[in-house]
Amino acid sequence: MYDVECVIVGAGVVGLAIAHSLSKLGLEVLVLEQHAHIGFEVSSRNSEVIHAGIYYPKDSLKANLCIHGKNLLYDFCQRYHVPHQKIGKLIIAHGTDGQQQLAKLQANAKACGLHDLQLLDAAQARAIEPQVHCDAALYSPSTGIIDSHSLMLSLQGLSEQYGAQIVLNTTVSALRQHPDSGFLVDIQEQDYQLHCKYLINAAGIHAPLLGTVLTPTAIVQQYCKGHYFSYQGANPFNHLIYPLPDNEGLGVHSCQDLAGQLRFGPDVQWVDEINYDPDPTRQTLFYETIRKYWPEIKKERLQPDFCGIRPKIAGPGEPAADFQILGPKDHQIPGLVQLYGIESPGLTACLAIGEYVQQQLQ
């Protein structure tokens, strides 16, 4: 009756984690990816941070899936030898207002079930990060970094062991309900339709465009471009260094790969189209932002590295939106799950999202 039991659109880290979760159940899973590589867009253009679960409102999907996903992810990395490091991070603040914001972040984290954060004064922060300038800091020992590509390869390999197929260079042009049951997936390259029983729209920044025919909800995609600049020279930091967050994100923070290469990002640039070309003129903005917490930075050592685009569903100046993972209970269509706004902490939460989608279908 069906060409395939379950189709997942998008082979980013979330789509692959869902494939892993569903194929373990014995479902026949087909993952369709438009690019020549897995994780080409959002999943490979980010800070590669395993977040602790500090920022998100209590009982939100972001809070619950981040904290649960973090634990699942560390266990997964240990079991399958995915390169990672629990490096820890400092969220730094200046002035009385900043210190009050740190206390609020710690209280919010406790309300969400995260109890390992430590408030540090300026001397304590400087003792572990001598080059960081701040009046206070919040230390998160469970924050980490990960090789996201190795993670995706592991998820792909495990899914294929359970029988899933990941097909690249295959663009999904439309998603529709079948007049009898299930769904039709239009494949652009072959001018062909697939008929499936279960459909998961995990297409990242492309998900709203594909999904509105099936469920014409008021999900509006906003393209938020973020630049990353690498830093030439020795990395002076032992931990990740974050400023206080604002409505548009977590701020231009220090991040590093597992080899210790230092970079900074992302900034916030609202754009009308998908374009991954870096803008070298943003060097001054980065320099002025970073020197507030690292006065020793040398501007000429900042070089444009890469860009990512966050799949935001809240616009400029609006509070950050929660993940939208809409299943049959939300839209009354059996077998359909649509994922919108899966930005940070989507990488951290990917395995928990896989479990959550599985529960939605069951």
Image (cartoon, rainbow, N blue to C red):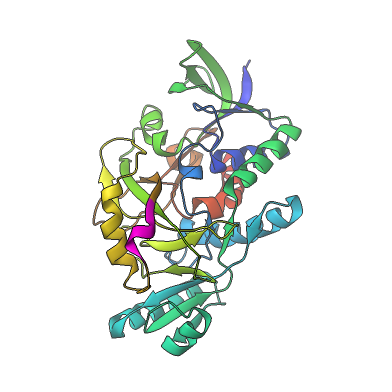
* Occupied quadrant, residue 221: top left
Mark count = 0
> Residue drawn at (52%, 62%), measured in percent from left and top?
51
The x and y percentages for residue 265 are: 39, 57
The x and y percentages for residue 48 are: 52, 53
Pick the quarter of the image with the C terminus: top right
Q: Horizontal placement of 136 versus 64: left or right?
A: left
**Above or below — where is 259 with respect to 362?**
below
**Above or below — where is 206 with respect to 112?**
above
Can you see residue 358? no
Q: Horizontal placement of 141 versus 253: left or right?
A: right
The x and y percentages for residue 12 are: 53, 39
> Residue drawn at (24%, 52%), measured in percent from left and top?
316
Pick the quarter of the image with the N terminus: top right
> Residue drawn at (71%, 32%), measured in percent from left and top?
160
* Front position in the image: 173 or 93: 93
> Residue drawn at (41%, 63%), measured in percent from left and top?
253
The stretch drawn in magenta includes residue 29: no
* Front position in the image: 3 or 78: 78
**Above or below — where is 258 with respect to 117?**
above
The x and y percentages for residue 232 are: 45, 58
* Front position in the image: 173 or 268: 268
Q: Which residue is situated farthest in the top direction here?
A: 191
Write the start and end of the magenta stretch as one range: 298-303
**Above or below — where is 159 with respect to 320?**
above
